[in-house]
Amino acid sequence: MDDHAPDPAHGPADGALLGGEQQPDPEQVEAGRLLFAAECRFFYAAQRLDQLPEPGLPEVAFAGRSNVGKSTLINALTGRKALARASNTPGRTRQLNFFDLGGRLTLVDMPGYGYAQAAKEIKEDWQGLMFEYLRGRPTLRRVVLLLDSRIELKASDLAVMDLLDRAAVTYQLVLTKADGVRPGALARKQDEVSALIRKHPAAHPELFTTSSDAGLGMETLRAELSGLGLPA
Ligand SMILES: Nc1nc2c(ncn2[C@@H]2O[C@H](COP(=O)(O)OP(=O)(O)OP(=O)(O)O)[C@@H](O)[C@H]2O)c(=O)[nH]1
Ligand SMILES: [Mg+2]
């Protein structure tokens, strides 16, 4: 078997671990499974705004601080090990990387923000590209904004939420690395971020909790995102 198809046995059913939260209906789960089992291929890397690919399929962009787990989440959702390059070194993804999922949805792996050690000019380039892309992309259906379950919210996360509010881009918050915190701390983080969501009208009301390593939350997130793609 190739490694393109998500492995249904990879993780426990989401509901079991999340105490009944985040339970999409079975039809949506199946739609998500089918979409993310489709072939996913990298087709474009953009370093500059004038190099973006022509707008085509609906797009979902994965944003968040450097090292939050964006590339790893794209790999986990698509059931691939190394589709998007992940790394321990913050600042690994340095361009907008575009992936075609089954000819129905484009996934965009964004460079991280908030990485202080990047050369100042390069850092400004990345952020400039990111903000311009978010503001101006007609096919952008949603931004998935990742927050690390183990790390406190940073000013840069709040700044990006404000920017998304102003740009009127719908975004949804996803906690990553839930395997790395104890249940009590995770629950507190979920409460904190849920309260934040309520203050941001452009934010999708539901918080998603994931662990790419443990396969947690993948089924639910696939189900949610499948609603944004072209019909099968
Ligand atoms: N424990 C744990 N570690 C994770 C998880 N997801 C990602 N990581 C680790 O976090 C580190 C960063 O992951 P990446 O996916 O490269 O992060 P990124 O957000 O794409 O980072 P940049 O491209 O630098 O912006 C890697 O060492 C991953 O193995 C997870 O669910 N659990
Ligand atoms: Mg990355």
Image (cartoon, rainbow, N blue to C red):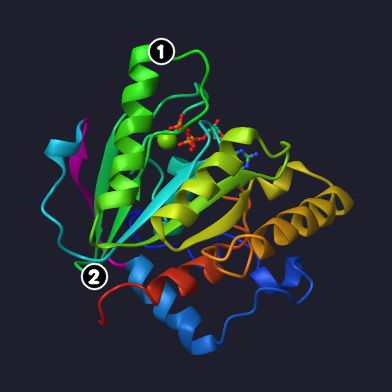
Q: Is residue 207 above or below residue 176?
A: below
In the image, what residue type sits under mark 1?
A: Lys
Residue placed most toward the observer, 130 or 177:
130
Give the residue at x 44% y 63%.
170
Instruction: Classify mark 2: helix, strand or loop.
Output: loop
The image quarter in which residue 180 lies: top right
Percent position of residue 26, x then y:
54, 87
**Mark 1 vs ligand 1: CB under 8 Å?**
no
Residue placed most toward the observer, 47 or 197:
197
Give the residue at x 51% y 51%.
145
Where does ligand 1 appear, by image quarter? Answer: top right
Percent position of residue 120, x then y:
40, 12
- Magenta part mainly helix, strand or loop? strand
The Cα atoms of the two marked residues, 1 and 2, are separated by: 37 Å
Q: Which residue is mark 2?
A: 104
Q: Mark 1 or mark 2, which is nearer to you? A: 1
Percent position of residue 75, x then y:
42, 48
The image quarter in which residue 218 lies: bottom right
Q: Which residue is mark 1?
A: 120
Q: Is residue 214 above or below residue 56?
A: above
**In the image, which residues are magenta?**
38-47
The 10 Å Cα crowd at callout 1, few under 14, some 14 to 19, many 20 or more, is few
In the image, what residue type sits under mark 2?
A: Arg
Q: Is residue 180 above or below residue 142?
A: above
Give the residue at x 53% y 48%.
162
Instruction: Classify mark 1: helix, strand or loop.
Output: helix
